[in-house]
Amino acid sequence: MDTLFLINSLWVMVGAVLVILMIGGFILLETGSTRMKNAGHIAGKTILTFGISSIVFWAVGYGLIFGEGNPLIGLSNFFYSGYDVEGLALSGSVFFLFQLAFAGISLTIAFGGFAERAKLGAYLVFAVLFACFVYPPIAHWIWGGGWLAEHGKQDFAGSTVVHLTGAMAALAATIILKPRIGKYNKDGSANNLAGHNQVFTALSVLILWVGWFGFNAGSTVSVDGAFFGFVALNTNLAAGAGVIAAMIISWIVLGKADVPMMLNGALAGLVAITASCAFVDTWAAVLIGFISGLLVCYSIRFFESRKIDDPIAALSVHGTAGVWGTLSTGFFATPELATVGQPGLFYGGGLHQLGVQALGVVSSGAFAFIVSFILLTIMKAVMNGLRVTEEEEIIGLDMSEHGSYGYPEIIKTEKTVIISEPKLNARF
């Protein structure tokens, strides 16, 4: 076994660990962005559903993506047993874990559309269905040698495969589940159901930012030429530009530098650069990140105005930024770096690659939304609804779904106050 094989395996294993640790970032992001009465539920269901998706990915997901089959789906390599893959310059087991982590992240994004109102059973069933029928076909089309790969679709680490797929599933869920109680008034105006902990949210962004080096730089799956360093540089620059852009636009529009918006700007920059991090120069990475920071602010306001209740801004951060990031390579991919597909419009490649990228966005986004919507509609009929009762939602999913609070001492204190001041009961 040669040294390069071992070093590649070690590097990608580090990347896999970083991506799996991003699950912790999403726990803090979703928990901090929602209300205290749902904190334990959010943390627990995220770990449980990642476990479910891991087993399903082992059983069928990996084979559906990377198995031999046809341009639409893989049809072999189910129940992966740890064998090495011919032509792959690293351990097959390590590559499997790396890909499993990506599937888990996409599912976690999708569940942003369920937050604070879905039954635990809805999470469990959809985790299985998403890992079988939504994520694998799109990943096969682009990464598994499918029909979009044959067209030269550029998506280095998953702006489309991971982020747009998860966001479109989240969109289907938000439409079917409808807004949370108290989000909208009778006149259609929106209320701000603020998250309970901005420190959690900021820490989550830092964890995700660091984890993204595994996400993007790890996707080189090789240490040859240390190209992963360039990918990491582009990743960091885009995130920095995204947070700056969101701060500027929120200051202009809202009159204040809104903290949640700045955090969303950083994540939008990371999502956008995920497709293009290996294909564009550093100046383009900054521009891609900056534009994503602007887009996410207006996208959040757009969805809210359409009465689409998105508690953690999954549709904007992962959907809108994912679309922009995917299209961006059609503008900025350089001849030297475009190892997949062709150079972008600004480098003499014409409209060809931009057309391929747009085709990938439309086909993948439509597939993820339509299939998720159908699956959730069937689940709703079979499971006698996906949403908890009004009483359970007001009490909070910690108690109604699990029988305990994520913050038991604080909740006890609040309940004592409620006894003496009944008006405060509306908070729970």
Image (spheres, rainbow, N blue to C red):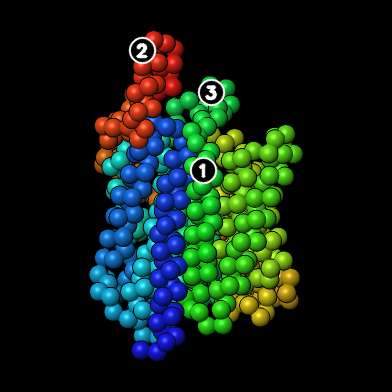
Marker disc for residue 419: 2
Q: Residue at x 40, y 89 (%)?
A: 2
Give the residue at mark 3.
Answer: 185
Q: Is residue 153 left or right of residue 46?
A: right
> Which residue appears farthest toward the bottom when viewing the image?
2
Give the residue at mark 1.
Answer: 201
Q: Quadrant of residue 262?
A: top right
Can residue 293 be spotted in the picture? no
- Residue 237: percent from the left, percent from the top? 65, 61
Q: Residues within 10 Å of mark 1 (few under 14, many from 20)?
A: many
The amino acid type found where label 1 is placed reads Thr
Q: CA distance from mark 3 to mark 2?
A: 28 Å
Q: Residue at x 50, y 79 (%)?
A: 223
Q: Quadrant of residue 283?
A: bottom right
- Residue 361: percent from the left, percent from the top? 55, 60
Secondary structure of the residue carrying tag 1 is: helix
Q: CA distance from mark 3 to mark 1?
A: 27 Å
